[in-house]
Amino acid sequence: MTGKPILLIVEDDPGLQRQLTWCFDAYEVLIASGKEEAITLLRRHEPSVVLQDLGLPPDPEGVSAGFEALTEILTLAPHTKVIVVTGNNDRDNAVRAVGAGACDFYQKPIDVDVLRLIVARAFHIHALEQQNRELREMQAGSTLEGIIATDPAMSHVCKLIEKVAPADVSVLLLGESGTGKELLAKAIHRLSTRRDGKFVAINCAAIPEQLLESELFGHERGAFTGAIKQVLGKAEVAAGGTLFLDEIGDLPIGLQPKLLRFLQDRTIERIGGRQVIPIDVRIICATNQNLESRIAEGHFRQDLFFRVSEVAIRVPPLRERAGAPTVLAHAFLHRFGALHGRPRRGFTREAIEALESYNWPGNIRELENRVKTAVILAEDPMITVADLALPAATSSASPLNLREARAAAEKQAVAAVVASTEGNLSRAAELLGVSRPTLYDLVERYKINVPK
């Protein structure tokens, strides 16, 4: 073997065998004329992608043998991406094949350029899913447990957290709702010198103002009506560990001076008490608010802002994380499939395109909910766009001609692979099945941003 990505072509026409072998010279091409030979090559070489004609002997005019081969290939190698080739105008069998687990289809007559793109996309999807499986295996020993960072933006956040965690400074996590700020706060705690202490969280936006002070600092018996016993506040409970103040931007303005005093002196007084209690605790805060705007509007104290943001880390929204929706969706698919006893084979091509093109206003929380619902309710092994309740991916305008359509598809494929490999052009060239000089030319031609 040459070390190139392996493509298995299942086709009984000798002429087409030669044509396809020639046009896929960027891959290690294996040829099988029927089901038995295909299964033998599948077992021996474990190809990432199979390009299979549905019309195979002994039923070359029908599709029964082709569907038998498809079923057996996916049973033996469920992670293999199968692209079925159908006869002209045979859309019904193509759709049926995708429903049975094929990742894509192509209708004859063959256009070599279009078929190359379809095959390259299948290799890309296979690589993303393989990366996701490897991440799951590594996750148990990961310092940032539960966090999947395959994109440059989130990888940068994880590096910052690894650096700041051992330093006993206040950290402010900034990001939209649903981006996983509490998960990151817990990672900071686990990597800190306070890992053996408690991690105590309080949502400043979820507790009424009249109760929030008591939740934070505690109260003495008889301090107010209904205070029938002494209660320790969250700050005191977290002593020796980490106190996480979520949605700090919604902290009532009247309570902010008391929190500031606590952060300056590291002491508290319970409501109704006179004893000054020293508290040794690390503070991590998070908010989805623009605190600078809140300060300008008079809703947040500037001196408090400086206290809670000794180190500020911006958590990017999901829409800014190229390739992340697909990887995260597969992780959720695996988790919920095992949890609910409904294993799924994966996502259809259209579903993956929808995952990557959707804006994700609810970020990771929304993605998790959509995949969970799809796993429970889907009727087929492959999760579809309809199962995810997402709009189908559409281009903003129709291409001028076929050349323009090919260029747009090529640019999208190259940009996606470059992003998913975090700028490793050697790996990207390998996944795309082109030489490094060819990839450099494509990056320059389409002005593709390469992550550093």
Image (spheres, rainbow, N blue to C red):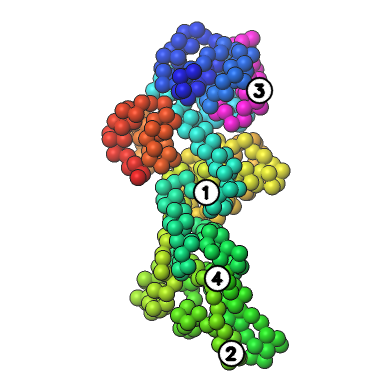
Element carrying mark 4: strand
Judge from the rendering whether residue 18 lies leftward or rightward of residue 451; answer left or right. Answer: right
Report the residue at 43% width, 12% height from top: 19
Instruction: Identify which residue, 89 or 170, lies in the foreground.
Output: 170
State the residue position of label 3.
72
- Residue 247 seen in the figure: no
State the residue position of label 4.
243
Marks 3/1: CA distance?
A: 33 Å
Marks 2/3: CA distance?
A: 74 Å
Is residue 422 highlighted in magenta?
Answer: no
**Alpha-carbon neighbours of circle 1 within 10 Å: few (<14), some, or many (≥20)?**
some
103 over 194 or under it: above or below: above
How far across and down, in percent of the image, does residue 8 sit?
53, 19
State the residue position of label 1.
148
Label located before the other in sequence (4 or 2)? 4
Q: Are marks 3 and 1 in contact (CB under 8 Å)?
A: no
- Specify the segment rendered in magenta: 57-82
At label 2, the amino acid type is Gln
**Which marked residue is nearer to the observer: mark 4 or mark 2?**
2
Label located before the other in sequence (2 or 1)? 1
State the residue position of label 2.
275
**Which marked residue is nearer to the observer: mark 1 or mark 4?**
4
At label 3, the amino acid type is Glu
Label located before the other in sequence (1 or 4)? 1
At label 4, the amino acid type is Leu
How far across and down, in percent of the image, does residue 288 sit?
46, 65
Judge from the rendering whether residue 331 lies leftward or rightward of residue 404; answer left or right. Answer: right
Instruction: Identify which residue, 366 or 90, lies in the foreground.
Output: 366
